Image: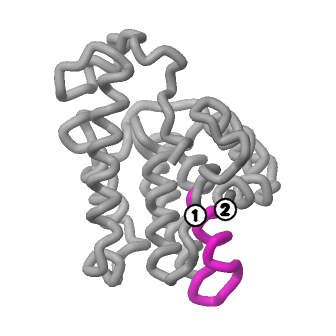
Amino acid sequence: MPVEASNAADGNAAITPGEQARLLPSLSTRAQLDEVERLKTNAARVWAMRAAVLQRGDLLCEAFILELHRRMFGGIWRGAGRYREAERNPGWEANRIAEGVRMFLDDAEGWIRFSTYPVHEAAVRLHHRLVSIRPWANGNGRHARLLADIVVATHGEEALTWGSRSPSAGRGSARSLYIEAIGSADAGEIAPLLGFARG
C-alpha cells in the first residue's frame, strides 16, 4: 500500500524526543520505526482478513476498532488501542472522540444496511470521518484504511487499492495524492478520495 510510505523524506532522520517518549521499543531512526510499524500493521491485516474475523458481528463497533488499533500498534506505541488524551489540531477535542467514533460507526452501519451508498463509498466515507476525528495519537490513516478494507472484504467487494494502481503511485507521490484527496473530502467532495482508494 503506497500510502504507508514514511512520513519523513529521509529514513535516517532521528525520531523526535516527543515520539521517543511514547515509543516502547528502543529505536533511533525513522526508517527503523517505519519498518517495525510496517511489520506489525501487516500482521494485523493478516489477522483481520481471516474468515473468522470477517464473520464477526461487531466489526462496526467501538470495541472492535480499539482491538484493531491495539493489534496494529501494540508493543510499538504507548496507548495503542486507547483514544488520545492530548488535544490535536486538526482533530476533534479529546473528550468528544468516543462520541464521534460511535456516531460515525453507527452512520456507516446504516449506510450499508440501507444501501445509502455502495459498499466502497460507505467504507471510504467511514475512513474519512475517522481520519477527521484523529482518535489516536499515532496511526490514524493506516487504521482507518484497514477498517475500510475490512468493511469492503466483509461484503465480498473488490479490494480497495489506496492509489497503488495510479500511474503516479511512487512512495512520496501516493502520500501527496492521498493528502490532497483527504483535503477535498474535508471540503465536502468525496469523489477524489474514492477515486484514489480505488486506483
Q: Look at mark 2 in the image and give the residue it sits on.
A: 198
Q: Look at mark 1 in the image and give the residue it sits on.
A: 160
x, y percent for residue 94:
45, 41
Of labels 1 and 2, earlier in sequence is 1
Residue at image coords 69%, 45%? 182
Q: Is residue 54 magenta?
A: no
Quick one: quadrant of the C terminus? bottom right
Check disc 2 and give the amino acid type: Arg
Residue at image coords 37%, 22%? 31
> Does residue 76 appear in this view?
yes
Which of these two is toward me, 13 or 62? 13
Q: Are marks 1 and 2 in contact (CB under 8 Å)?
A: yes
x, y percent for residue 92:
55, 43
Where, by quadrant of the figure, is residue 15 drawn? top left
Numbered-mark total: 2
Relative placement, left or right, of 165 versus 34 is right
Q: Where 7 falls versus 105 (above or below)?
A: above
x, y percent for residue 103:
53, 66
> Does residue 95 appear in this view?
no
Which of these two is toward me, 29 or 105? 29
Q: Mark 2 Cα within 10 Å, few/some/many (few <14, many 20+)? A: some
x, y percent for residue 75:
18, 39
Q: Could you tell me what secondary structure mostly forms the magenta stretch? A: helix
Q: Which residues are magenta?
A: 111-127
Q: Where 89 falls versus 149 (above or below)?
A: above
Where, by quadrant of the figure, is residue 161 drawn? bottom right
**Residue at the extreme bottom:** 114
Check disc 1 and give the amino acid type: Leu
Residue at image coords 49%, 49%? 96
